[in-house]
Image: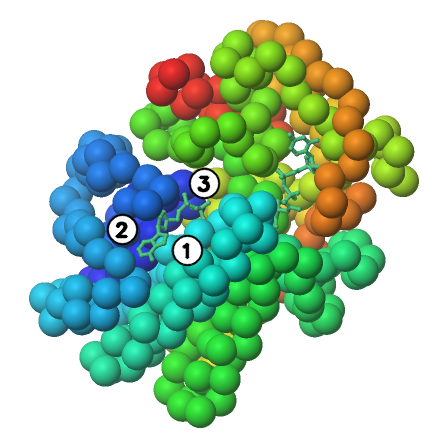
Amino acid sequence: MKTILVTGGTGFIGSHTCVELLKAGYQVVVMDNLSNSKADVVKKIETITGRTVPFYRADLLDVPSMDRIFREQKIDAVIHFAGLKAVGESVEKPLLYYQNNVSGTINLCEVMHKHDCKTIVFSSSATVYGMHNPVPMTEDMPTSATNPYGYTKVMLEQILTDLHTADPAWSVMLLRYFNPIGAHESGLIGENPNGIPNNLLPYIAQVALGKLPCLGVFGDDYDTVDGTGVRDYIHVVDLALGHIAACRYAFSHKGVEIVNLGTGSGTSVLQMIKAYEKASGRAIPFAIRPRRAGDVATCYADTQKAKDLLGWTAQRDIDQMCKDSWRFTVQNA
Ligand code: NAD
Ligand code: UD1
Protein backbone atom coordinates (compact mmCIF):
# COMPACT_ATOMS: atom_id res chain seq x y z
CA MET A 1 0.00 0.00 0.00
CA LYS A 2 1.49 3.35 -1.03
CA THR A 3 1.77 6.23 1.42
CA ILE A 4 0.98 9.76 0.27
CA LEU A 5 2.02 12.88 2.16
CA VAL A 6 -0.71 15.50 1.77
CA THR A 7 0.64 19.00 2.45
CA GLY A 8 -2.16 21.41 3.34
CA GLY A 9 -4.19 18.30 4.17
CA THR A 10 -6.47 20.05 6.69
CA GLY A 11 -7.45 22.68 4.11
CA PHE A 12 -10.49 22.72 1.84
CA ILE A 13 -9.30 20.66 -1.14
CA GLY A 14 -6.68 18.73 0.86
CA SER A 15 -9.18 17.35 3.37
CA HIS A 16 -11.51 16.05 0.65
CA THR A 17 -8.56 14.51 -1.17
CA CYS A 18 -7.45 12.72 2.03
CA VAL A 19 -10.92 11.15 2.28
CA GLU A 20 -10.83 9.92 -1.32
CA LEU A 21 -7.23 8.65 -1.01
CA LEU A 22 -8.16 6.63 2.08
CA LYS A 23 -11.27 5.27 0.34
CA ALA A 24 -9.07 4.25 -2.62
CA GLY A 25 -6.81 2.26 -0.28
CA TYR A 26 -3.83 4.61 0.10
CA GLN A 27 -2.16 5.41 3.43
CA VAL A 28 -2.24 9.13 4.14
CA VAL A 29 0.04 11.37 6.21
CA VAL A 30 -1.12 14.97 6.69
CA MET A 31 1.07 18.01 7.29
CA ASP A 32 -0.24 21.55 7.73
CA ASN A 33 0.79 24.64 9.70
CA LEU A 34 -2.91 25.39 10.40
CA SER A 35 -2.53 28.98 9.14
CA ASN A 36 -5.84 28.62 7.27
CA SER A 37 -7.45 25.49 8.75
CA LYS A 38 -8.13 23.70 12.01
CA ALA A 39 -6.63 20.55 13.52
CA ASP A 40 -10.08 19.02 14.17
CA VAL A 41 -10.37 18.39 10.42
CA VAL A 42 -8.08 15.37 10.93
CA LYS A 43 -10.64 13.82 13.31
CA LYS A 44 -13.39 14.51 10.78
CA ILE A 45 -11.43 12.76 8.02
CA GLU A 46 -10.99 9.82 10.42
CA THR A 47 -14.71 9.81 11.26
CA ILE A 48 -15.73 9.77 7.59
CA THR A 49 -13.30 7.02 6.59
CA GLY A 50 -12.87 4.95 9.75
CA ARG A 51 -9.08 5.13 9.21
CA THR A 52 -6.27 6.63 11.28
CA VAL A 53 -4.32 9.55 9.86
CA PRO A 54 -0.94 10.66 11.24
CA PHE A 55 -0.87 14.46 11.48
CA TYR A 56 2.18 16.72 11.63
CA ARG A 57 1.72 20.37 12.50
CA ALA A 58 4.64 21.62 10.44
CA ASP A 59 5.57 24.51 8.17
CA LEU A 60 7.05 24.25 4.67
CA LEU A 61 9.52 26.95 5.71
CA ASP A 62 10.80 24.83 8.63
CA VAL A 63 13.09 22.34 6.90
CA PRO A 64 14.03 20.26 9.99
CA SER A 65 10.37 19.57 10.75
CA MET A 66 9.72 18.65 7.11
CA ASP A 67 12.74 16.36 7.22
CA ARG A 68 11.39 14.69 10.35
CA ILE A 69 8.20 13.65 8.52
CA PHE A 70 10.23 11.89 5.83
CA ARG A 71 12.46 10.22 8.44
CA GLU A 72 9.47 8.91 10.42
CA GLN A 73 7.22 7.92 7.51
CA LYS A 74 8.02 6.08 4.31
CA ILE A 75 6.51 8.53 1.81
CA ASP A 76 5.99 7.32 -1.78
CA ALA A 77 4.51 10.53 -3.22
CA VAL A 78 3.44 14.03 -2.19
CA ILE A 79 0.23 15.84 -3.08
CA HIS A 80 1.18 19.43 -2.48
CA PHE A 81 -1.74 21.71 -1.56
CA ALA A 82 -0.08 23.84 1.12
CA GLY A 83 0.04 27.48 0.16
CA LEU A 84 -1.58 30.87 0.60
CA LYS A 85 -4.36 31.61 -1.90
CA ALA A 86 -5.95 35.04 -1.34
CA VAL A 87 -5.42 37.16 -4.46
CA GLY A 88 -5.97 40.55 -2.75
CA GLU A 89 -3.68 39.70 0.16
CA SER A 90 -0.99 38.63 -2.29
CA VAL A 91 -1.04 42.13 -3.84
CA GLU A 92 -0.60 43.69 -0.38
CA LYS A 93 2.01 41.19 0.85
CA PRO A 94 3.90 39.89 -2.19
CA LEU A 95 6.98 38.79 -0.24
CA LEU A 96 4.84 36.68 2.09
CA TYR A 97 3.35 34.90 -0.93
CA TYR A 98 6.66 34.38 -2.74
CA GLN A 99 8.31 33.14 0.43
CA ASN A 100 5.52 30.87 1.60
CA ASN A 101 4.49 29.42 -1.75
CA VAL A 102 7.70 29.50 -3.79
CA SER A 103 10.40 29.08 -1.11
CA GLY A 104 8.16 26.63 0.76
CA THR A 105 7.79 24.44 -2.33
CA ILE A 106 11.53 24.57 -3.03
CA ASN A 107 12.15 23.39 0.56
CA LEU A 108 9.67 20.57 0.09
CA CYS A 109 11.35 19.42 -3.15
CA GLU A 110 14.78 19.49 -1.50
CA VAL A 111 13.58 17.31 1.35
CA MET A 112 11.85 14.97 -1.12
CA HIS A 113 15.04 14.70 -3.17
CA LYS A 114 17.09 13.94 -0.06
CA HIS A 115 14.74 11.07 0.82
CA ASP A 116 14.53 9.84 -2.78
CA CYS A 117 10.82 10.63 -3.10
CA LYS A 118 10.38 12.04 -6.61
CA THR A 119 6.66 11.93 -7.30
CA ILE A 120 4.71 15.16 -6.78
CA VAL A 121 1.18 16.26 -7.64
CA PHE A 122 0.96 20.05 -7.50
CA SER A 123 -2.04 22.39 -7.08
CA SER A 124 -1.86 24.88 -9.88
CA SER A 125 -4.75 27.07 -10.96
CA ALA A 126 -6.71 28.23 -13.98
CA THR A 127 -5.45 31.67 -12.97
CA VAL A 128 -2.28 30.88 -15.03
CA TYR A 129 -4.37 31.26 -18.22
CA GLY A 130 -4.34 35.01 -17.53
CA MET A 131 -6.56 37.58 -19.27
CA HIS A 132 -6.06 36.94 -22.98
CA ASN A 133 -6.68 33.30 -23.88
CA PRO A 134 -9.92 32.27 -25.62
CA VAL A 135 -12.21 29.63 -24.05
CA PRO A 136 -12.12 26.75 -23.57
CA MET A 137 -8.68 26.77 -21.96
CA THR A 138 -6.30 24.10 -23.24
CA GLU A 139 -3.13 23.08 -21.43
CA ASP A 140 -0.82 24.25 -24.23
CA MET A 141 -1.94 27.91 -24.08
CA PRO A 142 0.57 30.58 -22.95
CA THR A 143 0.52 31.31 -19.23
CA SER A 144 0.65 34.64 -17.42
CA ALA A 145 -0.53 36.27 -14.22
CA THR A 146 -1.98 39.54 -12.96
CA ASN A 147 -1.06 39.29 -9.26
CA PRO A 148 1.63 37.74 -7.01
CA TYR A 149 -0.57 34.72 -6.15
CA GLY A 150 -0.91 33.93 -9.85
CA TYR A 151 2.82 34.44 -10.38
CA THR A 152 3.60 31.90 -7.65
CA LYS A 153 1.65 29.31 -9.66
CA VAL A 154 3.34 30.27 -12.96
CA MET A 155 6.77 30.14 -11.27
CA LEU A 156 6.15 26.86 -9.50
CA GLU A 157 4.98 25.19 -12.71
CA GLN A 158 8.30 26.28 -14.25
CA ILE A 159 10.40 25.24 -11.23
CA LEU A 160 8.84 21.77 -11.10
CA THR A 161 9.29 21.37 -14.86
CA ASP A 162 12.98 22.35 -14.55
CA LEU A 163 13.38 19.83 -11.73
CA HIS A 164 12.29 17.04 -14.05
CA THR A 165 14.54 18.32 -16.86
CA ALA A 166 17.53 18.13 -14.51
CA ASP A 167 16.57 14.74 -13.11
CA PRO A 168 14.20 12.65 -15.30
CA ALA A 169 13.49 10.32 -12.35
CA TRP A 170 10.93 12.90 -11.18
CA SER A 171 7.26 12.46 -11.92
CA VAL A 172 5.43 15.79 -11.82
CA MET A 173 1.70 16.40 -12.25
CA LEU A 174 0.67 20.06 -12.58
CA LEU A 175 -3.09 20.18 -12.00
CA ARG A 176 -4.87 23.37 -13.00
CA TYR A 177 -8.02 23.67 -10.94
CA PHE A 178 -10.94 25.73 -12.14
CA ASN A 179 -13.39 26.89 -9.40
CA PRO A 180 -13.74 24.28 -6.62
CA ILE A 181 -16.93 24.58 -4.54
CA GLY A 182 -19.28 22.28 -2.61
CA ALA A 183 -18.47 20.06 0.34
CA HIS A 184 -18.42 16.43 1.42
CA GLU A 185 -21.92 14.89 1.60
CA SER A 186 -21.45 14.20 5.33
CA GLY A 187 -21.45 17.96 5.98
CA LEU A 188 -18.36 17.42 8.18
CA ILE A 189 -15.76 19.02 5.92
CA GLY A 190 -16.03 21.96 3.52
CA GLU A 191 -14.78 25.48 2.93
CA ASN A 192 -14.68 27.77 5.93
CA PRO A 193 -12.85 30.99 5.07
CA ASN A 194 -11.84 33.41 7.82
CA GLY A 195 -13.57 36.80 7.75
CA ILE A 196 -15.55 38.13 4.80
CA PRO A 197 -15.18 35.75 1.84
CA ASN A 198 -13.63 36.94 -1.44
CA ASN A 199 -14.91 34.12 -3.62
CA LEU A 200 -18.45 33.85 -4.94
CA LEU A 201 -19.76 30.64 -3.34
CA PRO A 202 -18.65 31.23 0.25
CA TYR A 203 -20.10 34.75 -0.05
CA ILE A 204 -23.45 33.49 -1.37
CA ALA A 205 -23.56 30.92 1.44
CA GLN A 206 -23.12 33.66 4.07
CA VAL A 207 -25.88 35.75 2.47
CA ALA A 208 -28.22 32.73 2.40
CA LEU A 209 -27.46 32.18 6.06
CA GLY A 210 -28.29 35.82 6.86
CA LYS A 211 -24.76 36.61 8.11
CA LEU A 212 -24.16 39.04 5.24
CA PRO A 213 -26.99 41.24 3.91
CA CYS A 214 -26.43 41.30 0.16
CA LEU A 215 -24.18 39.89 -2.56
CA GLY A 216 -22.38 42.35 -4.81
CA VAL A 217 -22.39 41.09 -8.41
CA PHE A 218 -19.18 42.33 -9.99
CA GLY A 219 -20.36 43.55 -13.41
CA ASP A 220 -23.43 42.81 -15.56
CA ASP A 221 -22.07 44.11 -18.87
CA TYR A 222 -19.75 41.26 -19.88
CA ASP A 223 -20.27 39.53 -23.21
CA THR A 224 -21.90 36.48 -21.59
CA VAL A 225 -25.32 34.84 -21.44
CA ASP A 226 -26.69 37.42 -18.94
CA GLY A 227 -23.80 39.91 -18.68
CA THR A 228 -22.31 38.44 -15.48
CA GLY A 229 -19.01 36.53 -15.18
CA VAL A 230 -18.97 32.88 -16.24
CA ARG A 231 -16.80 30.28 -14.47
CA ASP A 232 -16.25 26.53 -14.49
CA TYR A 233 -17.37 25.48 -10.99
CA ILE A 234 -16.30 21.97 -9.99
CA HIS A 235 -17.44 19.91 -7.01
CA VAL A 236 -14.55 19.52 -4.56
CA VAL A 237 -15.17 15.75 -4.35
CA ASP A 238 -14.80 15.45 -8.14
CA LEU A 239 -11.62 17.49 -7.85
CA ALA A 240 -10.36 15.17 -5.10
CA LEU A 241 -11.07 12.16 -7.33
CA GLY A 242 -9.02 13.85 -10.07
CA HIS A 243 -6.06 13.69 -7.67
CA ILE A 244 -6.48 9.95 -7.18
CA ALA A 245 -6.39 9.52 -10.96
CA ALA A 246 -3.33 11.80 -11.19
CA CYS A 247 -1.49 9.82 -8.48
CA ARG A 248 -2.22 6.55 -10.24
CA TYR A 249 -0.83 8.02 -13.46
CA ALA A 250 2.25 9.49 -11.74
CA PHE A 251 3.15 6.15 -10.15
CA SER A 252 3.45 4.54 -13.57
CA HIS A 253 4.96 7.40 -15.63
CA LYS A 254 7.99 9.66 -15.26
CA GLY A 255 7.76 13.14 -16.76
CA VAL A 256 5.76 16.32 -16.43
CA GLU A 257 2.06 16.51 -17.28
CA ILE A 258 -0.19 19.56 -17.10
CA VAL A 259 -3.87 18.71 -16.70
CA ASN A 260 -6.98 20.89 -16.35
CA LEU A 261 -9.42 19.79 -13.67
CA GLY A 262 -12.76 21.37 -14.51
CA THR A 263 -16.17 20.32 -15.80
CA GLY A 264 -15.88 21.97 -19.21
CA SER A 265 -19.01 24.08 -18.81
CA GLY A 266 -19.60 27.56 -17.49
CA THR A 267 -22.14 29.04 -15.05
CA SER A 268 -22.85 32.76 -14.68
CA VAL A 269 -23.11 34.60 -11.36
CA LEU A 270 -26.88 35.04 -11.81
CA GLN A 271 -27.32 31.34 -12.67
CA MET A 272 -25.37 30.46 -9.53
CA ILE A 273 -27.57 32.70 -7.38
CA LYS A 274 -30.67 30.92 -8.74
CA ALA A 275 -29.18 27.47 -8.12
CA TYR A 276 -28.26 28.39 -4.55
CA GLU A 277 -31.71 29.83 -3.86
CA LYS A 278 -33.18 26.51 -5.01
CA ALA A 279 -30.78 24.43 -2.89
CA SER A 280 -31.18 26.52 0.27
CA GLY A 281 -34.81 27.59 -0.05
CA ARG A 282 -33.62 31.09 0.89
CA ALA A 283 -33.67 34.34 -1.09
CA ILE A 284 -30.23 35.74 -2.02
CA PRO A 285 -30.49 39.53 -2.22
CA PHE A 286 -27.96 40.99 -4.67
CA ALA A 287 -26.91 44.33 -6.16
CA ILE A 288 -24.94 45.02 -9.33
CA ARG A 289 -21.52 46.55 -8.62
CA PRO A 290 -18.64 47.64 -10.87
CA ARG A 291 -16.42 44.99 -12.45
CA ARG A 292 -13.64 43.60 -10.18
CA ALA A 293 -10.11 44.36 -11.40
CA GLY A 294 -8.40 41.30 -12.89
CA ASP A 295 -11.63 39.43 -13.69
CA VAL A 296 -12.17 37.87 -17.12
CA ALA A 297 -15.65 37.53 -18.64
CA THR A 298 -15.55 33.78 -19.16
CA CYS A 299 -13.29 30.97 -18.03
CA TYR A 300 -13.88 27.26 -18.50
CA ALA A 301 -11.75 24.21 -19.15
CA ASP A 302 -11.11 21.99 -22.10
CA THR A 303 -11.35 18.65 -20.29
CA GLN A 304 -10.20 16.30 -23.06
CA LYS A 305 -6.70 15.73 -21.69
CA ALA A 306 -7.97 14.76 -18.22
CA LYS A 307 -10.26 12.24 -19.88
CA ASP A 308 -7.63 10.82 -22.26
CA LEU A 309 -4.66 10.76 -19.88
CA LEU A 310 -6.28 10.11 -16.50
CA GLY A 311 -9.61 8.55 -17.47
CA TRP A 312 -11.24 11.16 -15.24
CA THR A 313 -14.28 13.39 -15.76
CA ALA A 314 -16.28 15.42 -13.25
CA GLN A 315 -19.67 13.88 -12.41
CA ARG A 316 -21.48 16.24 -10.04
CA ASP A 317 -23.68 19.11 -11.30
CA ILE A 318 -24.26 22.65 -10.01
CA ASP A 319 -27.38 21.64 -8.04
CA GLN A 320 -25.37 19.00 -6.17
CA MET A 321 -22.56 21.51 -5.51
CA CYS A 322 -25.03 24.03 -4.03
CA LYS A 323 -26.87 21.37 -2.01
CA ASP A 324 -23.65 20.08 -0.45
CA SER A 325 -22.35 23.60 0.20
CA TRP A 326 -25.61 24.52 1.94
CA ARG A 327 -25.62 21.40 4.12
CA PHE A 328 -22.07 22.14 5.27
CA THR A 329 -22.91 25.83 5.83
CA VAL A 330 -25.94 25.05 8.00
CA GLN A 331 -24.19 22.31 10.01
CA ASN A 332 -21.21 24.55 10.73
CA ALA A 333 -22.98 27.88 11.32
P1 NAD B 1 -6.79 26.12 1.94
O1 NAD B 1 -6.28 27.44 2.44
O2 NAD B 1 -8.09 25.63 2.47
O3 NAD B 1 -5.69 24.98 2.17
C1 NAD B 1 -4.30 25.26 2.11
C2 NAD B 1 -3.68 24.74 3.41
O4 NAD B 1 -2.28 24.98 3.38
C3 NAD B 1 -4.24 25.41 4.65
O5 NAD B 1 -4.75 24.43 5.53
C4 NAD B 1 -3.03 26.15 5.25
O6 NAD B 1 -3.07 26.13 6.67
C5 NAD B 1 -1.88 25.35 4.69
N1 NAD B 1 -0.61 26.09 4.55
C6 NAD B 1 -0.42 27.30 3.96
N2 NAD B 1 0.88 27.62 4.02
C7 NAD B 1 1.53 26.59 4.65
C8 NAD B 1 2.88 26.34 5.01
N3 NAD B 1 3.85 27.25 4.78
N4 NAD B 1 3.18 25.20 5.63
C9 NAD B 1 2.21 24.28 5.91
N5 NAD B 1 0.91 24.46 5.60
C10 NAD B 1 0.58 25.61 4.98
O7 NAD B 1 -6.83 26.23 0.34
P2 NAD B 1 -7.47 25.24 -0.73
O8 NAD B 1 -8.61 25.93 -1.35
O9 NAD B 1 -7.63 23.89 -0.17
O10 NAD B 1 -6.29 25.25 -1.81
C11 NAD B 1 -5.30 24.25 -1.85
C12 NAD B 1 -4.32 24.57 -2.98
O11 NAD B 1 -5.03 24.65 -4.21
C13 NAD B 1 -3.60 25.90 -2.81
O12 NAD B 1 -2.27 25.74 -3.25
C14 NAD B 1 -4.36 26.83 -3.73
O13 NAD B 1 -3.55 27.88 -4.22
C15 NAD B 1 -4.75 25.88 -4.86
N6 NAD B 1 -5.94 26.33 -5.59
C16 NAD B 1 -7.09 26.59 -4.92
C17 NAD B 1 -8.21 27.05 -5.62
C18 NAD B 1 -9.50 27.37 -4.88
O14 NAD B 1 -10.34 28.03 -5.45
N7 NAD B 1 -9.70 26.90 -3.65
C19 NAD B 1 -8.14 27.21 -6.99
C20 NAD B 1 -6.96 26.92 -7.66
C21 NAD B 1 -5.85 26.47 -6.94
C1 UD1 C 1 -10.60 33.95 -8.02
C2 UD1 C 1 -9.23 34.53 -8.28
C3 UD1 C 1 -8.33 33.44 -8.83
C4 UD1 C 1 -8.28 32.25 -7.86
C5 UD1 C 1 -9.69 31.76 -7.57
C6 UD1 C 1 -9.72 30.70 -6.52
C7 UD1 C 1 -9.47 36.90 -8.72
C8 UD1 C 1 -9.43 37.97 -9.77
N1 UD1 C 1 -9.33 35.65 -9.19
O1 UD1 C 1 -11.10 33.41 -9.24
O2 UD1 C 1 -7.02 33.92 -9.05
O3 UD1 C 1 -7.52 31.19 -8.41
O4 UD1 C 1 -10.49 32.87 -7.11
O5 UD1 C 1 -9.30 31.17 -5.29
O6 UD1 C 1 -9.61 37.18 -7.53
N2 UD1 C 1 -18.11 37.44 -7.96
C9 UD1 C 1 -19.13 38.34 -7.68
N3 UD1 C 1 -19.28 38.74 -6.38
C10 UD1 C 1 -18.48 38.29 -5.36
C11 UD1 C 1 -17.45 37.37 -5.68
C12 UD1 C 1 -17.30 36.97 -7.00
O7 UD1 C 1 -19.87 38.75 -8.56
O8 UD1 C 1 -18.66 38.71 -4.21
C13 UD1 C 1 -17.99 36.95 -9.36
C14 UD1 C 1 -16.64 37.24 -9.99
O9 UD1 C 1 -16.62 38.48 -10.61
C15 UD1 C 1 -16.51 36.07 -10.97
C16 UD1 C 1 -17.25 34.92 -10.27
O10 UD1 C 1 -18.12 35.56 -9.32
O11 UD1 C 1 -17.17 36.35 -12.17
C17 UD1 C 1 -16.33 33.96 -9.53
O12 UD1 C 1 -15.48 34.69 -8.65
P1 UD1 C 1 -14.51 33.96 -7.61
O13 UD1 C 1 -15.27 32.95 -6.84
O14 UD1 C 1 -13.80 35.03 -6.83
O15 UD1 C 1 -13.49 33.16 -8.54
P2 UD1 C 1 -12.55 33.67 -9.73
O16 UD1 C 1 -12.68 35.12 -9.97
O17 UD1 C 1 -12.79 32.78 -10.89
Tag 1–tag 3 contact (CB < 8 Å): no
Quarter occupied by residue 137: bottom right
Q: What's the residue type where badge 3 is placed? A: Val
Question: Which of the two residues, 94 or 185, is positioned nearer the viewer here?
Answer: 94
Tell me: is circle 1 under 8 Å from ligand 1: yes
State the quadrant of the C terminus.
Answer: top left
Q: For the point 26% across and 76% down, which residue is it?
A: 111
Quarter occupied by residue 155: bottom right
Q: Determine the quadrant in which ligand 2 lies.
A: top right
User: Mark 2 = which residue?
Assistant: 33
Q: What's the residue type where badge 1 is placed? A: Gly
User: Mark 3 = which residue?
Assistant: 237
Numbered badge on residue 83: 1
Q: CA distance from mark 3 to mark 2?
A: 23 Å
**Under tag 2, what secondary structure?**
loop
Question: In the rendered image, is residue 306 in sight?
Answer: no
Left or right of 71 in this view: 144: right
**Dot 1 alpha-carbon crowd within 10 angstroms: few under 14, some 14 to 19, many 20 or more:** many
Left or right of 180 in this view: 31: left
Name the spot of residue 151 as percent of width and height, x first. Answer: 59, 64
Of marks 1 and 2, which one's residue comes earlier in the chain?
A: 2
State the quadrant of the N terminus.
Answer: bottom left
How is the structure coloured here?
rainbow
Q: For the point 58% across and 46% down, which residue is it?
A: 88
Name the spot of residue 259 as percent of width and height, x first. Answer: 57, 63
**Under tag 3, what secondary structure?**
helix
Of marks 3 and 2, which one's residue comes earlier in the chain?
A: 2
Of marks 1 and 3, which one's residue comes earlier in the chain?
A: 1
